[in-house]
Image (cartoon, rainbow, N blue to C red):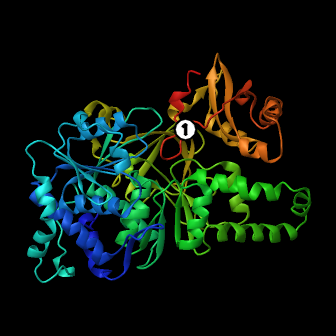
Amino acid sequence: MINENFIKLYEESFKKNWNLKALNDYNEPNHYTYGELAGEIAKLHLLFEECRIRRGDKIALIGKNTSSWCITYLASVTYGAIVVPILQDFNPNDVHHIVNHSEAVLFFTSDSIWETLEEEKMDELRGVFSLTNFRLLHQRDGEEFNSILSNLENNFTEKYPKGFDKECVKYTDLSNDKIIVLNYTSGTTGFSKGVMITCNNLASNVMFAKNIINLQPGDKMLSFLPLAHTYGCAFEFLYALSAGCDVTLLGKTPSPKILMKAFEEIKPVLVIAVPLILEKIYKKMILPILGKRSMRWVLNVPLLDQQIYSQIRKKLVNAMGGRFRQVVIGGAPLNGEVETFLHKIKFPFSVGYGMTECAPLISFSLHPNYVPHSCGKVLDGMEARIDSSDPQNIAGEIQVRGENVMAGYYKNDEATKDTFTEDGWLKTGDLGTLDAGNNVFIRGRLKNMILGANGQNIYPEEIEAKLNNLPFIMESLVIEKDRKLIALVYPDYEAVDSIGISADNLPAIMEENKVTLNSMVASYEQISKIRLFPDEFEKTPKKSIKRFLYSNI
């Protein structure tokens, strides 16, 4: 068990960093110091008290990355309630189900999402509040939340007649073994389960980041990953605020164009990203440079190539604000070609590995100790093993146990039992190897692996990584049909249009891509056909393709 109490981390941080900037919404007037943040949390605590919310009650939360989202999350956990963060990408039926399944009594939602929901389908809710201004949106018959809200400011003044100062900050005594979050997975299987995350799970992740990354009070952070997912929540939000950082919440879809502008303005000291962001930057910013005939010649000349790589690294660093110490990549595997190039130009990045059930980290190594093409070293406090006869050379399922592992799935004993081995190890569902230095190497998802005609293990993710770097391919999905491999491809229509290629020429181009790909892979990995798709593949908030939707195409 971690020594540091999760709740007390924030009590201490708010007092220590009272006058420093804590949260602000990008291009919005909302901004809070740590003292002001503590005051807003205290007002919600008073609301919870007067609404008779008990320790352990569930409070659901859905919306964009905003200050009000963060205030609600922190107010819930420091009060002793269990927060239920819901990804805003979920459809209304999923939201209804999660609110009901979690037994939430209060619900905080953005106004736009509330318009898509039906309160009669969530009849156990006692009250619904807006994340725009905390006004009441709905209350169950017999509740008096409107009256409580109208008197809240007066009651707050009465409770703190001398004003609210740092001495007023005292949060619930909650031991680290208690459940504090129900995080409903958004995986690629289409079945959402409520992961029971303890205070210890979160404290372990936060303290690991404190010890290895070591951000300082006042350091700037940009939060653009969905905070309802454990990856962004743990490191862009919970760790950052425990360290006294100045966090800007993007609050909009992080397209490369929007991100580049935000990076330039905020200049974060640490960038937490998913692979898709770096892969898009590589494809749009770097590949066009490398594709020039003169550049290909220069890169074959000793010494000159290093000068060019240095210039590209500088351009990439500046595009991401220019002041970060490193980029941490997680959430999905990084394309192998992109990673190789980033190492070649000495770009400061590392790749971690985790899952919601570990809140989220399993392995990570700080640059420059990161071993190329690995997912870092298994964390202290965690253990990993490979279900394989030769764990260093033959891929098997990665299984883990330790401080970060969840307590189980909420009200789902059968799924919990199926996810753990008989001797207590969590089955990740990922295939990989483990080297002598305890570094994890991922091969793919166990459920995605295809068994070849002669018993070979085929990892579609590895084929897709090669295919995605070929001309005019935005993304791809390799599936098996009639014992043959077929590649579903969403073309890069922007690139096609930019050089005046007719869409009628795409089948011929893809046939060339198929020939190129098949020359790069083993005979049993060769694809028989490329099938074009007119739209992007549907994805999870982590930007992983929902493969189950396309398995029977």
The amino acid marked with disc number 1 is Ile
Q: Residue at x 24, y 57 (%)?
A: 135
Residue 94 placement, left or right of 462: left
Give the quarter of the image for residue 211.
bottom left
Q: Residue at x 77, y 43 (%)?
A: 497
On the image, the x and y values in percent for residue 395 come to 56, 39
Residue 25 placement, left or right of 539: left
Give the quarter of the image for residue 215.
bottom left
Would you say residue 267 is visible in this rendering? no
| Image quarter of the N terminus | bottom left
Q: Residue at x 12, y 65 (%)?
A: 151
Would you say residue 41 is visible in this rendering? yes
Seen from the viewer's position, the closer of residues 74 and 467 is 74
64 vs 152: above or below: above
| Image quarter of the C terminus | top right
Seen from the viewer's position, the closer of residues 492 and 553 is 492
- What secondary structure is found at the residue carrying circle 1? loop
On the image, the x and y values in percent for residue 527 come to 72, 27
Q: Which residue is mark 1?
A: 545
